[in-house]
């Protein structure tokens, strides 16, 4: 699979889909579905090409779903006023109990009597949910409702119009993206309709457009919970002005809560969300729960590399370079590597555990504890740079290295890290910078948690 940068993908989307108004269908706008298709095309992602049936006549598709329903399916349980979509990531609270990293504190504040927790595909199977994936997936076999047939027709009309202007080689990716959207919309509309639910709380508005559309058509307000880095170089957050007049229909959440004013200002630099939709709720994560009690400990000679998800092709060559440098020039130092919670190439990193001066920390490692010990952090781009603020860590973002050098440059522009070239000595540079403060402050990024902000949204 090819690996273009986010900037290259964004530029290709803007060139192939210059008028977001062309992406309208029914009460919605499919601009993000076009993004998915163009990104998959740019990446030459063959897994994104599926056996789509969207072009079949609606009557034939209706008969197909009806035939599936004859095999039987279970109706969804009665939901509560709030539905939380599990975020899959886990952390440990002050007592060492494993919790949902982003959702636990929010759910705890509203009370279990008001909230239903639904699993998502990546949810740890050993945890407990009010609604399992099997219950949601069973709804794929439900017959199509009148509203769903209407959405299907609108998608078909949009696809037919689009074939007149989108390059033919991109169309299979678009049909596939439309099919994925409709399948998700169908099962979640069956899940949400005729329920007493008022709010649906989730992370990542992108690749979850079917769920958002289903909630909207069911009269349910969608709240997005910030789950990580938001950057002007993101594919799915800071949109160009061309989308602004269509953003209310483009399957974003109705509201988004963020950790601090820094993230709100970043979102406002794009056209996805407006000022009234963005709410600073502070640090509602499990790490935020522990932050007040977790004073910075005794510092050790550790260089912490926080590897970004599925970028082992960039991080492992740098790890080899850094280990050689430490072994030869700084034998009193160690390199620790913290894997991303959703890393797929774990074995490639674990192979370095036998190297001297090296320690690989798995996906469940405690980032707070690591930052309290480490003196230096090196990464390309990551929220871990922001997590390190206020912890007496010197942050470095690798520049002119790998496919995401523009993203890494934005870390310097934001004031959260110092620049480091891939062949520079970070320990030597640390000695020069260790008493110099970065311009960005922790409270700008992670404000104290304000439960009233979320409570006001769901009251």
Image (tube, rainbow, N blue to C red):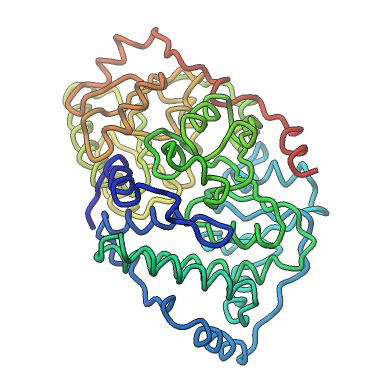
Quadrant of the drawing holding the N terminus: bottom left
Q: Residue furthest toward the right? A: 113
The percent coordinates of residue 128 (x first, y second) are: 67, 61
The mark total stands at 0
Residue at the image point whose x is 57% and y is 24% from the top = 261
Residue 78 or residue 328, whichever sits in front: 78
Residue 57 or residue 383, whichever sits in front: 57
Q: In the rendered view, would you say 423 is above or below 197?
A: above
456 sits left or right of 245 in the view: right
Q: Can residue 214 be seen in this view?
A: yes
Q: In the rendered view, would you say 293 is above or below 63?
A: above
Residue at the image point whose x is 25% and y is 60% from the top = 44
57 sits left or right of 429 in the view: right
The percent coordinates of residue 389 (x first, y second) are: 48, 21
Rendering quarter of residue 174: bottom left
Rendering quarter of residue 162: bottom left
Residue at the image point whose x is 74% and y is 34% from the top = 451
Residue at the image point whose x is 44% and y is 32% from the top = 384
The percent coordinates of residue 173 (x first, y second) are: 33, 65
């Amino acid at each position: 699979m090819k690996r273009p940068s986010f900037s290259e993908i964004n530029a290709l989307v803007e060139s192939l889909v210059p008028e977001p108004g062309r992406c309208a269908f029914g009460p919605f706008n499919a601009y993000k579905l076009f993004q998915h298709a163009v990104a998959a095309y740019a990446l030459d992602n063959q897994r994104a090409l599926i056996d789509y049936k969207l072009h079949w006549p609606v009557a034939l598709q209706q008969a197909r779903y009806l035939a599936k329903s004859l095999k039987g399916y279970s109706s969804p349980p009665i939901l509560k006023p709030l539905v939380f979509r599990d975020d899959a990531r886990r952390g440990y609270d002050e007592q060492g109990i494993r919790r949902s990293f982003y959702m636990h504190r929010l759910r705890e504040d509203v009370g279990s009597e008001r909230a239903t927790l639904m699993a998502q595909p990546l949810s740890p199977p050993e945890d407990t949910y009010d609604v399992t994936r099997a219950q949601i997936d069973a709804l794929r076999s439900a017959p199509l409702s009148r509203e769903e047939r209407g959405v299907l027709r609108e998608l078909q009309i949009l696809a037919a119009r689009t074939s007149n202007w989108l390059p033919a080689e991109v169309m299979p990716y678009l049909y596939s993206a439309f099919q994925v959207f409709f399948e998700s919309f169908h099962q979640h509309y069956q899940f949400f309709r005729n329920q007493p639910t008022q709010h649906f709380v989730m992370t990542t508005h992108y690749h979850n457009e079917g769920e958002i559309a289903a909630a909207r058509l069911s009269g349910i307000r969608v709240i997005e919970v910030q789950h990580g880095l938001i950057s002007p170089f993101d594919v799915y957050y800071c949109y160009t002005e061309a989308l602004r007049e269509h953003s209310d229909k483009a399957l974003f959440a109705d509201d988004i809560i963020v950790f601090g004013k820094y993230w709100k200002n970043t979102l406002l630099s794009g056209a996805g969300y407006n000022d009234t939709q963005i709410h600073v709720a502070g640090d509602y994560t499990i790490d935020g729960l522990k932050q007040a009690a977790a004073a910075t400990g005794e510092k050790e000679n550790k260089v912490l590399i926080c590897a970004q998800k599925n970028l082992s092709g960039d991080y492992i060559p740098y790890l080899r370079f850094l280990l050689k440098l430490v072994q030869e020039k700084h034998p009193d130092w160690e390199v620790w590597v913290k894997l991303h919670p959703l890393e797929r190439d774990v074995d490639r990193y674990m192979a370095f555990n036998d190297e001297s001066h090296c320690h690989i920390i798995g996906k469940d490692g405690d980032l707070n504890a690591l930052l309290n010990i480490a003196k230096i952090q090196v990464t390309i781009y990551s929220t871990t740079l922001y997590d390190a603020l206020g912890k007496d860590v010197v942050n470095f973002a690798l520049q002119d290295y790998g496919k995401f050098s523009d993203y890494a440059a934005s870390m310097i522009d934001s004031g959260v890290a110092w620049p480091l070239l891939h062949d520079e000595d970070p320990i030597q540079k640390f000695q020069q910078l260790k008493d110099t403060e970065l311009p960005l402050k922790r409270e700008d990024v992670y404000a104290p948690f304000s439960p009233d902000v979320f409570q006001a949204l769901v009251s």
